[in-house]
Amino acid sequence: MSNADDAHSAAERKMQFLYALRSKGVTDSRVLAAMESVDRGPFIKGLFSERAYEDMPLPIACGQTISQPSVVGLMTQALEISPRDKVLEIGTGSGYQAAILSKLARRVYTIDRHRRLVHEARTIFQDLDLVNITAITADGSFGLAEQAPFDRIIVTAAAEDPPGPLLAQLKEGGIMVLPVGQSDAVQHLIRVRKTADGLEYDEMRSVRFVPLLEGLGKDG
């Protein structure tokens, strides 16, 4: 295949990728531009790398998954990120979600309990010159008190309820998006807005995420 054919194939793949996002409800122009600018390929290793551009979750190291792009897009869109925002992500995973956030926010802090995942994500962030991301190995259920408060918080693992420490670290006027549910079979993506009068909850859609676990992973 010639270079011209390669370029045509890549352009067509990107068009199909963006079409799939729009068809699932990702319509925010800044989010679409961010997702167009971040190639999902480098975040997926091994056997599944050829499926990087399909709208499906895929397994990654440490028994974790990389979410399907449409879910990444919908969660990102629900955050309503502005260019001045400081964002906390719980569950670095492959690093793909943090890379998208980095294109929209001033600063991104991302935490994972698996040291290996954080190390691999840092390498990709450096390769892509994403200098506004700080990746940390820690128990994400406690958030990151030393950098609080945050304008936006995103959690990519399911808890029974929004964790108290994370709600406490959310700025008034801030938004948190996370999956909640007691089992991996019944989970709902919700958006929490913190107002002067308390917390407002919106239920968005059914999802399936790995559980939010306390402590560090066995590799860390």
Image (cartoon, rainbow, N blue to C red):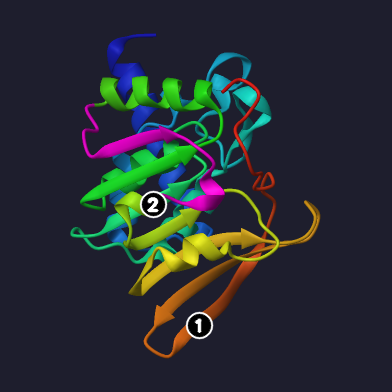
Q: Quadrant of the N terminus?
A: top left
Residue 158, position as x, y percentages in the image: 65, 53
Magenta-drawn segment: 129-144
Residue 180, position as x, y percentages in the image: 66, 62
Calculate the distance from the C-alpha at mark 1 to the C-alpha at mark 2. Answer: 19 Å
In depth, the one of 68 and 138 nearer the eye is 138
Answer left or right for 6 relative to 126.
right
Which residue is at a point 41% across and 34% down the rendered structure image? 136
In depth, the one of 15 and 182 nearer the eye is 182
Q: Amino acid at mark 2?
A: Leu
Answer left or right for 44 relative to 129.
right
Identify the residue at the far bottom of this view. Answer: 197
Indicate whether residue 138 is drawn in magenta.
Answer: yes
Residue 84 location, quadrant: bottom left
| Vertical comparison of 108 with 40: above or below | below
The residue under label 2 is: 88
Residue 204 location, quadrant: bottom right
In depth, the one of 82 and 9 nearer the eye is 82
The residue under label 1 is: 200
Q: Considering the numbered disc 1 on the image, is that residue within a helix, a strand or a loop?
A: strand
Residue 129, position as x, y percentages in the image: 22, 27
Which residue is at a point 51% across and 58% down the rendered structure image? 23
Residue 124, position as x, y percentages in the image: 35, 23
| Vertical comparison of 99 with 181: above or below | above
